[in-house]
Amino acid sequence: MNRSRLTAAFLFIGGLLILTLGISLTIQSGLGASPFDATLVGLSGSIGLTVGSWEILIAILLLVLNTWLSGKRPEILGLATAFVTGLGIDVWLYWLNDWIEPGLPAGRLVCFTSGLIVTGLGTALYLQAKFAPSPLDRLTLLLQKLTGRSIFFTRTLLYLLFLLAAFISNGPIGIGTLLTVCLGGFILNFFMPLTEKALNRISLEQPL
């Protein structure tokens, strides 16, 4: 494996592990998770299976939808992203359950805020790998292309749909859900140029 592929693999796996730590912290805070993650938790609590298992199952459904909308072959690599994400969420939730159990409002807020920031950093790193977007991210791009609207519009539309799904499945909807919708894009936008600049600096410092 050459250096560029090794770097991409490191960013992909490392970024997703950081991303899933952030997701798990927001869930553990008890203040509410993103609409998508709240749906996963709601389905896990009402039907069964782990949160990570529902991440993978919904990813498969979205992959089928994306294939139908695009008229192209299934983007199987996107399932690798969902698999690593689902596994990461389950492992982090298992570990954090014994270590982090905030009770006071201040502790919950610190836990949630930390999770939101870590999620943005992990997402930025994983996207820098340019390996394979998750089926949800691919659906966002497909809807943007089909509707001619902005990514902000299509992402918000999907968030609203998953918010309804989270409500129906009795997922953890709270102030954290609103904060994720409002601040998630801003935090990602903050970390993307920083991670890109850092990675470019590292690549320049490495010997040929």
Image: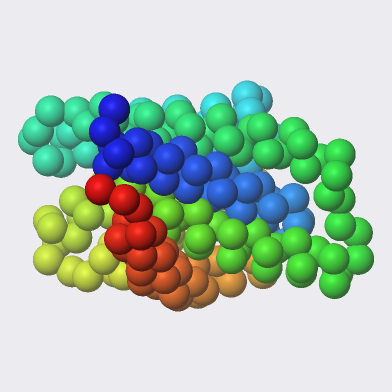
> What is the count of numbered marks?
0
Residue with the most extreme left position: 71
The quadrant in which residue 194 appears is bottom left
Relative image position of residue 77 (x, y in whole percent): 28, 30
Q: Is residue 38 left or right of residue 182?
A: right
Q: Is residue 18 left or right of residue 161?
A: right
Is the residue 71 above or below the residue 171 in the image?
Answer: above
Relative image position of residue 23 (x, y in whole percent): 60, 51
Residue with the most extreme top position: 49
Relative image position of residue 6 (x, y in whole percent): 35, 36
Q: Residue at x 56, y 49 (%)?
A: 18
Residue with the most extreme right position: 104
The quadrant in which residue 131 appears is top left
The answer to whether any part of residue 149 appears in the image is: yes
Relative image position of residue 135 (x, y in whole percent): 32, 40
Is the residue 195 above or below the residue 99 in the image?
Answer: below
Q: Residue at x 43, y 34 (%)?
A: 82
